[in-house]
Image (tube, rainbow, N blue to C red):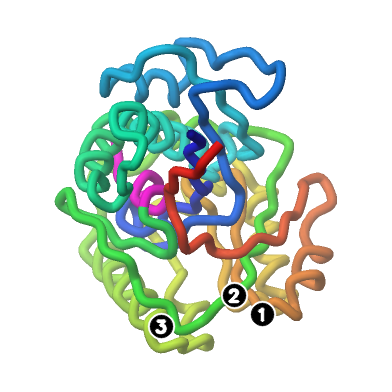
């Protein structure tokens, strides 16, 4: 069997640890090799998750998701390992039937639920209190991501954030998170730019990655509907019309790599080998 899991972009601006979007860039884990590749080592997050639920034998992992760039590599890997463990016990497993268990364990391993929920369920997901709900989407945008050559540490990035925030900052982000969910649901494109603004975490992270701020601004100047720091960065994600994707991608700083992706609506799936 093969477990296929999408990458993700977390936060979407204001929805810190609460919103995630699955992207059409997929990690695959399998219990038998498809070629001459070596099994993933025991320290790999997919293997550690696989073992956590009793998975036995080797696990072979292929992934185009860059590590340390804010596209949910570790979350996708952990979801893949957990689903693979379920599928090893029950080859005909329905992922939706075990999704609640996978979400709980993946969140424990990852430390927060936004990336793992998006990779598990697909689409745009709101998550809190151990629950995850897909946000209805009345629009099907292109997602242009700018991936720079440098990495950032999520734990170090989170450590720079304030433990307490002013009331007006909290109100600003709560309002925009609510507006973003509503704008997705009804397809209000002009609202997306305002709805993805943030005062809670992005500026702190941009301070150590000014190239990412420049990429965000360039995407907006080129006509993107919205743009944000993907997870803890340094990748930047932008939403735009499919017809505008090449223009937005071309406007991004040359020192990074621009990729034009789609929202993945399938989430984690088990496929026949």
At mark 3, the secondary structure is helix
At mark 1, the secondary structure is loop
Q: At 64% across and 51% down in the image, what residue appears?
A: 212
Task: State if disc 1 and disc 2 touch (CB < 8 Å).
Answer: yes
> Real-space Cα distance between discs 3 and 2?
13 Å
Where's residue 90, x and y in %?
A: 30, 33
Task: Count neighbours of disc 3 (C-alpha within 10 A) and say few if under 14, some if 14 to 19, many if 20 or more.
Answer: many
Residue closer to the observer: 174 or 265: 265
> Real-space Cα distance between discs 3 and 1?
15 Å
Q: Which residue is identified by label 1?
A: 241
Where's residue 79, x and y in %?
A: 38, 37
Q: Earlier in the sequence, mark 3 or mark 2?
A: 2
Q: Which residue is identified by label 2?
A: 141
Residue 168 within the segment the image draws in magenta: no
Task: Count neighbours of disc 1 (C-alpha within 10 A) and say few if under 14, some if 14 to 19, many if 20 or more.
Answer: some
Q: Main secondary structure of the magenta part?
A: helix
Along the horizontal axis of the image, is 210 left or right of 266?
Answer: right
Asked if 238 appears above or below 27 in the picture, the reply is below
Q: Which residues are magenta?
A: 111-120
Q: At 28% across and 53% down in the image, what residue appears?
A: 96
Q: Which residue is identified by label 3?
A: 183
Task: State if disc 1 and disc 3 touch (CB < 8 Å).
Answer: no
- Report the number of numbered marks: 3
| Residue 254, disc | none
Q: At 43% across and 78% down in the image, what residue appears?
A: 137
């Amino acid at each position: 069997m093969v477990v296929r899991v999408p990458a993700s972009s977390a936060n979407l601006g204001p929805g810190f640890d609460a919103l995630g979007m699955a992207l059409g860039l997929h990690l695959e884990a399998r219990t038998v090799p498809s070629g001459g590749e070596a099994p993933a080592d025991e320290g790999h997050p997919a293997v550690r998750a696989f073992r956590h639920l009793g998975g036995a034998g080797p696990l072979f992992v292929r992934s185009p998701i860059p590590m340390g760039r804010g596209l949910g590599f570790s979350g996708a890997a952990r979801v893949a390992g957990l689903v693979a463990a379920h599928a090893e016990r029950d080859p005909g497993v329905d992922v939706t039937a075990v999704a609640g268990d996978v979400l709980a364990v993946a969140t424990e391993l990852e430390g927060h639920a936004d990336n793992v929920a998006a990779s598990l369920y697909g689409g745009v997901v709101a998550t809190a209190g151990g629950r995850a709900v897909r946000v209805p989407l009345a629009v099907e945008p292109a997602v242009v991501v700018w991936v720079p050559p440098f990495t950032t540490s999520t734990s170090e990035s989170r450590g720079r954030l304030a433990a307490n925030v002013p009331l007006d900052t909290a109100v600003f982000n709560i309002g925009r998170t609510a507006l973003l969910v509503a704008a997705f649901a009804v397809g209000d494109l002009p609202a997306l730019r305002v709805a993805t603004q943030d005062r809670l975490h992005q500026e702190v992270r941009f301070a150590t990655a000014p190239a990412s701020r420049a990429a965000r601004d360039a995407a907006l100047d080129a006509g993107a509907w919205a743009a944000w720091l993907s997870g803890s960065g340094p990748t930047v994600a932008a939403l735009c019309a499919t017809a505008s994707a090449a223009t937005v991608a071309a406007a991004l700083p040359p020192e990074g790599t621009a990729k034009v992706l789609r929202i993945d609506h399938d989430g984690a799936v088990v496929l026949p080998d």
